[in-house]
Amino acid sequence: MPSQQPPAALIPTLERRAPRSSRGLVVRALALAAGLGIGASTALAQAELPASLLSSASALTAEQSAQIETYVKPHLESLRADDAERVNRARRALILPLTRSGVGVAFRQAYARQVGVSLAQVSGGTSVINAVNALRVAAELSTEEGFDIVEKAYAAPDPAVRLAAAAATARAFEVAGRAGAAVVPARLRSATTRLGAMLAPNAEANPDVTDTVARALIVAMQTSPHAEVRNEATLVLTRGLVERARAIKGAAASPRLLDAVLRTGLAIRDDLTNVSGARPPLSAEATRGVHELAGELIALGARQIRGGELAAIRQADSPEERKAKEQARSVLSQVVGAGEQILSLSASSGDPVRTDMASLVRRASTESDAKFLEDARALLGAGGRLTKPPFNLPGDRFDMGR
């Protein structure tokens, strides 16, 4: 495997959607697939399809379908090649017509019929590089067939392919949120449900894949104009991460899981501050999921501190020891802070949530830890603020450790 990174322009969307620390998984597939040293401006071998065909408002004629077949056939053959440069160029050529302005539903459906079988075969094959590139094309289709192909790869034996499938789903959600998409809301909702199943504690062992799944659901939550899709994405995302976080007991939290939890918390916080009105409001069930996740972010911090996974700073500690302890708490303090902010934004102005627990976690002293645990119990425990409107959560809902 070459040690150098491929040129940035050659890394398609699915790689950029992957977390930085997991790029090894995707670069393993895409560094070769992109063809190191091949510039993004490399000319495509085939002439482009005419704009009138791309924007057709009615079912395509036999002649137009034949034009598509003529265009895609050599590229589909190249997508199966052993030569990384050929695969890279084929991927870009197959995506190109789908990215042009004015692409209509009729064209997307006809295009999907021409490429679907080949994409399914390649994405389910033994070559990681070919599979990842095929998934990238399937993501751009914005059709039910495209989602079918991507979802099948969730069960791939190689984590690089599973990560690519989750990242491809994120791209598919983006495309489906625009005009000219060819996927009905019910299918998009089922796509979020199937993706969310990967967040179950025993479903996906690779933390980088888990993080990418969370990222894809965030995209669905933020970009879908359909209330049922946005609500389902929010619900499966929050429930999945609550289950993952709740399973952490008596052991230090995985840095990748903390990253996923933090990113989700910040995305939800930002969503709550969105005042443009462009996004459908969350349902009562999805809102409850948001509140439960926010509480779990704080409860996770309590369990980590109470369980001794994050040691307090002592007077006898050397500067190096102090720095290490502060760094160990950095992400967890942000996780706790995201939970606080979500609850503060959700509370009524007449009975606000005013806490400063993130700073207590960062302070890392015996006294600040004791104060944090006290405040967490007052917020989350029996008779606490979260047992009252608008939260109305049970007083025994959160495990803060013993």
Image (cartoon, grey):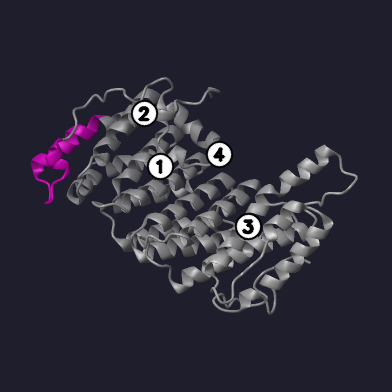
Circles 2 and 4 in contact, beta carbons < 8 Å: no
**Residue closest to the eye, 266 or 158:** 266
Image-based side of 198 in relation to 69, left or right: right
Q: Residue at x 29, y 46 (%)?
A: 141
* 2 or 1: tag closer to the N-terminus: 2
Quarter of the image for residue 336 reads bottom right
Residue matched to label 4: 22
In terms of sequence position, does the residue under pointer 1 or pointer 4 come before the other? Answer: 4
Rounded to the nearest whole Å, what is the CA distance between mark 1 and mark 4? 22 Å
Check disc 2 and report the residue beneath it.
88
Report the residue marked by disc 3.
337
Of labels 3 and 1, the one closer to you: 3
Query: Which residues are the magenta region?
Result: 50-74
Earlier sequence position, callout 3 versus callout 1: 1
Look at label 4 and name its amino acid.
Ser
Amino acid type assigned to the residue bearing label 1 in the image: Gly
The crowd level at tag 1 (other Cα within 10 Å; few <14, some 14-19, many 20+) is many
Gap in Å between the C-alphas at discs 2 and 4? 21 Å
Q: Nearer the viewer, mark 2 or mark 1?
A: 2
CB within 8 Å, label 1 to label 4: no
- Residue 239: percent from the left, percent from the top? 54, 64
Number of the front mark, 2 or 3: 3
Measured in 3D between alpha carbons, the distance from the residue under mark 3 to the one under mark 1, in whole angstroms, is 42 Å
Query: Comparing marks 2 and 4, which lies closer to the viewer?
Result: 4
x and y, in percent, of residue 401 in the image = 75, 65
Q: Quadrant of residue 353?
A: bottom right
The residue where tag 1 is placed is: 124
Between the residue at mark 3 and the residue at mark 4, the CA separation in whole angstroms equals 25 Å
Query: CB of mark 3 within 8 Å of CB of mark 1?
Result: no
The quadrant of the picture occupied by the C terminus is bottom right
**Res. 283 visible in picture:** yes
